[in-house]
Each structure stands twice: as structure tokens, then as C-alpha cells.
Amino acid sequence: MFVRTTREIGLLVRDRRREVGLTQAQLAEQVGASREWVRLLESGRPRLDLGLTLRALNAVGIVLDARLTTSTTPPTERRRTKRGSE
């Protein structure tokens, strides 16, 4: 599965948390966060603590697999170029 947005990460965590039978409170306890933080993660809130996010992914059994694109232009630059040329 390719995940491109914080919303997609949130939905993935939420769906997996439910599959493994954890409540938001139980997941929060496992990662050392509040239930509100888990709610924000699952809603796709940007700029959450990366360490906690990685612990949440691990707690529900999601493996993060980072891959490089074949393009030498960073994704943020590609987006700027597309918008600027329209």
C-alpha cells in the first residue's frame, strides 16, 4: 500500500487498530500518548510527533518501508514546478 498523506496514515492506523482489537485508549497507553493524540493521528492531523507515530505503527503491526523515487527532483520541487507551469 502506498501512503501519501497524513490522512492515509491515520486511516491505516485506525483500521489496523480495530483489526487487532485495540481501543484508542489501549493504543495510547502502549505508545505513551493520550487518547486524544491517537484520535488526532487517526484523523490525519499533520505535524504530530514522529517518534510517537512510529511507535503507534509498530504497536498495531504496521511496517514502514521507505523507498526512493527514480526522479532526482525532490517531490516538493516537482509539485512547485507543476503548479508554476499551469
Image (tube, rainbow, N blue to C red):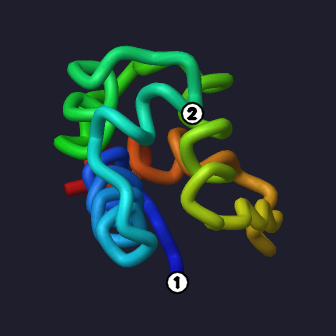
All told, the count of numbered labels is 2
Horizontal and vertical percent for residue 16? Answer: 41, 70
**Viewport quadrant of the C terminus:** bottom left
Q: Secondary structure at mark 1?
A: loop
> Residue drawn at (47%, 66%), measured in percent from left and top?
3
Q: Nearer the viewer, residue 82 or 33?
A: 33
Image check: 39 left or right of 77? Answer: left
Horizontal and vertical percent for residue 75? Answer: 57, 50
Q: Residues within 10 Å of mark 1 (few under 14, many from 20)?
A: few
Q: Place residue 21 in its image quadrant.
A: bottom left
> Residue drawn at (48%, 26%), measured in percent from left and top?
29
Q: Secondary structure at mark 2?
A: helix
Amino acid type at mark 2: Gln
Going from the N terminus, do you reach mark 1 or mark 2 first? 1
Q: Residues within 10 Å of mark 2 (few under 14, many from 20)?
A: some
Q: Nearer the viewer, residue 85 or 42?
A: 42
**Numbered label attached to residue 81:** none
Between the residue at mark 1 and the residue at mark 2, the CA separation in whole angstroms equals 25 Å
Q: Which residue is mark 1?
A: 1
Image check: 55 left or right of 85? Answer: right
Q: Compared to 85, does 46 lie above or below?
A: above
Q: Nearer the viewer, mark 1 or mark 2?
A: 2
Disc 1 + disc 2, Cβ < 8 Å: no
Amino acid type at mark 1: Met
Q: Which residue is mark 2?
A: 30
> Residue drawn at (46%, 17%), measured in percent from left and top?
33
